[in-house]
């Protein structure tokens, strides 16, 4: 089942915040990676499927734009979608918004490479992967 834009809610917890009492920059990166994995699992390509195929996704680049802070107890809506899926590369976009007013807190984009687990070299995505994701123009 294709899910063009995958979204879920998250409540900011104490472990997500830093000495300034807002979500730390490295935590936003953790949110980006976790959300990409959750989207893959939601379309039926979880970690077990990758292991069975002998493949993995590795990050080539992350770009994160921090617009506003999120604080302890705040509810945010996390969204991700695939903007490019070709050969061995996948580009994803991300948006993190406040649930209360829809304000965008963080925008991100990641470039992922599809690799063979043994050789760690790029590998073209099989139809089993390509057929699961919708590509959404950004």
Image (cartoon, rainbow, N blue to C red):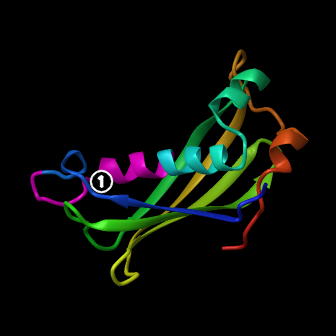
- Give the magenta-colored segment's residue range: 19-33
- Check the image and report above or below for 26 versus 63: above
Instruction: Answer left or right for 86 relative to 106.
Output: right
Seen as rendered, the residue at the extreme top is 118
Q: Name the residue under label 1.
A: 25
Query: What residue is at 25 percent from the left and 49 percent from the top?
Result: 16
Query: What residue is at 72 percent from the left and 17 percent from the top?
Result: 119
In magenta segment, residue 92: no
Question: Residue 93: x, y in percent?
Answer: 58, 63
Instruction: Answer left or right for 111 relative to 70.
Output: right
Instruction: Answer left or right for 88 relative to 28.
Output: right
Query: Looking at the rendering, in which quadrant would you find the C terminus?
Result: bottom right
Res. 77 image quadrant: bottom left
Res. 118 image quadrant: top right
Question: Residue 49: x, y in percent?
Answer: 73, 30
Question: Residue 29: x, y in percent?
Answer: 40, 49
In magenta segment, residue 26: yes
Query: Pointer 1: residues within 10 angstroms few (<14), some, or many (20+)?
Result: some
Query: What residue is at 37 percent from the left and 75 percent from the top?
Result: 99
Main secondary-structure element of the magenta-colored stretch: helix
- Check the image and report above or below for 87 versus 53: below
Query: Looking at the rendering, in which quadrant would you find the N terminus?
Result: bottom right
- Check the image and report above or below for 90 versus 100: above
Question: Residue 123: x, y in percent?
Answer: 80, 32
Return the residue nearer the eye: 77 or 22: 77
Numbered disc 1: secondary structure: helix
Seen as rendered, the residue at the extreme left is 19
């Amino acid at each position: 089942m294709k899910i063009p834009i995958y979204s879920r809610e998250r409540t900011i917890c104490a472990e997500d915040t830093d000495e300034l009492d807002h979500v730390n920059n490295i935590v936003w990166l953790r949110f980006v990676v976790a959300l990409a994995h959750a989207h893959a699992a939601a379309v039926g390509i979880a970690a077990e499927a990758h292991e069975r195929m002998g493949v993995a996704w590795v990050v080539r680049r992350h770009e994160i734009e921090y617009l506003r802070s999120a604080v302890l107890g705040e509810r945010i809506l996390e969204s991700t979608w695939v903007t490019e899926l070709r050969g061995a590369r996948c580009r994803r976009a991300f948006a993190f918004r406040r649930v209360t007013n829809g304000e965008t807190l963080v925008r991100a984009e990641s470039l992922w490479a599809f690799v063979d687990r043994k050789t760690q070299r790029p590998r073209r995505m099989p139809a089993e992967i390509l057929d699961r994701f919708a590509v959404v123009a950004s």
